[in-house]
Amino acid sequence: MSWKRNYFASGGGAVGGVQGLVNPRTMTSIAPSKGPEHEPGQNSCFLNSALQVLWHLDIFRRSFRQLTTHKCMEDSCIFCALKSIFAQFQFSSERVLPSDALRSALAKTFQDEQRFQLGIMDDAAECFENLLMRIHFHISAESREDICTAKHCIPHQKFAMTLFEQCVCNSCGATSDPLPFIQMVHYISTTSLCNQAVRMLECREKPTPDMFGELLRNASNMGDLRNCPSNCGEVLRIRRVLMNSPEIVSIGLVWDSDHSDLAEDVIHSLGTCLRLGDLFYRVTEERARQAELYLVGMVCYYGKHYSTFFFQTKIHFHSDAFSFCVCVFTPNPPPPPLPSPSSIPTSPPLLSPAAPPDWP
Ligand SMILES: [Zn+2]
Ligand SMILES: [Zn+2]
Ligand SMILES: [Zn+2]
């Protein structure tokens, strides 16, 4: 998969041997790292990662700051716990901030489902999705999750992809009933991603950056075959149509096995620019069709630990042992790369390395 060079710097000798991705600029001089506490045994890194994604997204942070009223659930209130930790991120002089209140509110909220319980590791992408849905619950209690139109609901206004899927038979013309749904994270299998990347490169002379959206679309359709709705014998691919224009798009990468050897191929398949119009079979809104989104952050899983990386300059990849779980795209392109610094940490950091230089 040779189009990696179009997207990512290849690493360079100065930082050889460093595992993971690092952000040179913030690592060295500009902003002190601040992050949620991570004690062994707490297994809170899945939550901390989701939290860091929300914090580092300007669009979310600014809108969330403006929210005041909510349906409070007291000691299981995720809204209050988030408000509190965001205030600490902004004002505290401590580098390590306790996220216990949020962890405990999350555990209480999901007690009946036995998910996100104290001391137990869980999935960062699902946690991220569920945090968004809980914020929706706290601020738009009257609206249902699948039809929320509340103007102040950040999850639905900024993150949600409103879709419908349908099968159309080219042979007999039959169409299935459109199935509408909303998703906060667009999941894609890493196996499909890699297979599709190879297939696309086989029939093209040269890879181009705008292939990334198409690659994701093809990968997400792969294997998702249905019988013709009128059973004419055709096997059809499902068509997904995007009906809104989300500002933030999160791509969740699903690893088919714990011991996948695809990490390096996945890295090489990822692009930093995503045209929303390419991601689905059809995109109805003109604004969405024109939207170009840029990779701003990732949640990675390595050595039974989640880390979050947000970038202001560029991301280096040096390890084939990382699993990327969530890639977040927003309309703001990262600033141009700066020269590499001389000193870079040599182990996967427990704290997220990234923090914007100032908090707008
Ligand atoms: Zn509350
Ligand atoms: Zn909502
Ligand atoms: Zn048919």
Image (tube, rainbow, N blue to C red):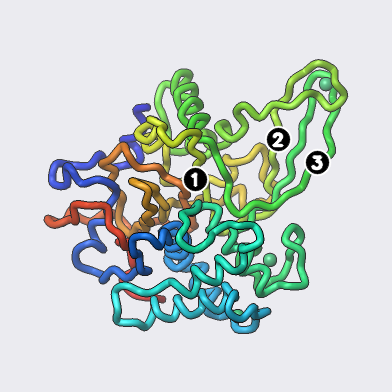
- The residue positioned 62% from the left and 67% from the top of the image is 109
**Residue sitting farthest toward the top:** 233
Report the side of 155 relative to 16 (left or right): right
On residue 178, the disc is 3
Instruction: In the rendered view, tell whether residue 153 sits above or below residue 219.
Output: below
Q: x%, y% of residue 22?
A: 27, 53
Q: Label 1's element?
A: strand
Amino acid, disc 3: Pro
Q: Label 3's element?
A: loop
Kindly report the distance in space between the C-alpha atoms of the residues bearing marks 2 and 1.
19 Å
- Residue 70 is drawn in which quadrant? bottom right
Instruction: In the rendered view, tell whether residue 77 sits above or below residue 110.
Output: below
Q: x%, y% of residue 197?
A: 46, 28
Instruction: In the rendered view, tell whether residue 232 sits above or below residue 153.
Output: above
On residue 33, the disc is none
First reached walking from the N terminus: tag 3 or tag 2: 3
Task: Please rate how many residues cluster around mark 1, counting C-alpha atoms within 10 Å: few if below 14, some from 14 to 19, many from 20.
Answer: many
- The residue positioned 41% from the left and 76% from the top of the image is 360
Q: Are marks 2 and 1 in contact (CB under 8 Å)?
A: no
Mark 3 CB in 8 Å range of ligand 3?
no
Nearer to us in this view, 256 or 3: 256
Mark 1 CB in 8 Å range of ligand 2?
no
Q: Which residue is mark 1?
A: 274
Q: Label 2's element?
A: strand
- The residue positioned 78% from the left and 29% from the top of the image is 168
Q: Which residue is mark 2?
A: 239
Kindly report the distance in space between the C-alpha atoms of the residues bearing marks 3 and 1.
26 Å
Amino acid, disc 1: Leu
